[in-house]
Amino acid sequence: MSTAPNFDERIERRGTHSSKWDMMEPIYGVPASDGIAMWVADMDFRPPPCVQAAIEGMAAHGLYGYFGDARANHDAIAWWMKTRHGWVVEAAAIFTTNGLVNGTALCVDAYTKPGDGVVLMTPVYHAFARVIAAGGRRVVECELAIEDGRYVLDIAGWDAQMTGSERMLVLCSPHNPGGRVWTGDELREIAAFCVRHDLILVSDEIHHDLVMPGHKHTVMALAAPEIQDRLVMMTATTKTFNIAGCHVGNVIIPDKALRARFQASINAQGVSPNTFGMVMATAAYSPDGAAWLDALVAYLDGNRRLFEEGVATIPGLCPMALEATYLAWIDFAGTGMAPAEFTARVEKQARIAANHGASFGAGGGSFLRFNLATPRAVVAESVVRLKQAFADLQ
């Protein structure tokens, strides 16, 4: 009988080459000695035992050569997408990349040319803009609207922004950092927007397994099957199972012509799979991995409630309701403070490292993003510290 995961366990990560914990002080000035790292989107939990067993099996074998024969991995991906998302995926449509930032960069290379516009619905995951700009393309920021405290589409406004030089849209579904689970109708609106403006639609669904109870994620390939000829799907085990360091992502392309263009970019850039990552991902997409994930989501939902309820008691702070991901998006506009002031209180007084909202693009300036995928005691401590840092507003 498997043992239930202990997400309350405090695992020391300092001094382990952890970006999240070991770079907190150099980047944010939050002391390593007693600071709380709530920025980088990885979890402070061990992955499922099935993943650990797979790595231990590799270590016992003792040979670490090039990876070959991806059939088991493709079978695992197909099983997961069918059983968890109701989506049938064929093996020929699956490409393996060195994570989904790499997958995004490959899409930029395959489907656009230098100077072309690439559309982002901002504020959104900051790495998208980074790789678009690094590739010599133009970042086109279509800002999301806020209604009743949650992000909504502004299709009419975005239509007016288009110049005809845009070639691709990168969608974040579920949305990071806002935690929105887009409805089927919203996804179809986005698909129609892409058809209207002749855009390739790259749907990054890396958080699609981390959906809070009461919400339902819809795969873009199922929401708008009529756009298969312009659709690229991106999924991964990395966020779901906390194995981001394995740098493996799934790029799933239904259309054969788009596959050929993507394959050409892979060939040109010499991309090949990480053996450790392939073994870990194959093990994770399994019934054992699914059971672990169900326990994880229930735990994250408890952390969400604790953090949202605690932060909501601080005058001027407004948490956006978290429907998916483990990333809380908190608006500090109500404090009347400039970003430099409220950020300094969080970093210097509360000693918490959180992502700065401006890094996510237009519309993010008054926000900070907090990672809640950590033992509940740490979340509780973060709430106490934030209340103390803004005690003069009480």
Image (spheres, rainbow, N blue to C red):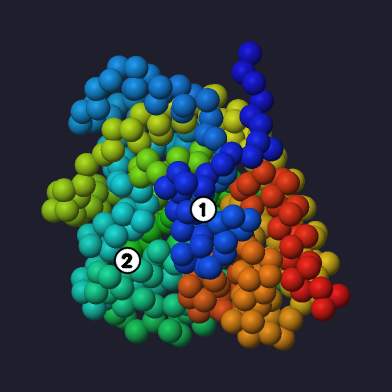
Label 1, on which residue? 21
Residue 353 position (above or below residue 10): below
Nearer the observer, disc 1 or disc 2?
A: 1
- Amino acid carrying label 1: it is Trp
Q: Residue at x 50, y 41 (%)?
A: 242
Location of mark 2 (residue): 131
Q: Residue 391 location in percent, x, y? A: 81, 73
Q: Residues within 10 Å of mark 1 (few under 14, many from 20)?
A: many
Q: Looking at this rendering, what residue extends furthest in the right direction?
A: 394
The percent coordinates of residue 394 (x first, y second) are 86, 75
300 sits to left or right of 139: right
Residue lying farthest left? 268
Q: Residue at x 28, y 38 (%)?
A: 274
**Which of the 4 quarters of the picture holds residue 283?**
top left
Label 2 Cα crowd, 10 Å radius (few <14 / some 14-19 / many 20+): some
Q: Quadrant of the N terminus?
A: top right
Identify which residue is drawn at 51% across, 62% down: 25
Residue 149 falls left or right of residue 106: right
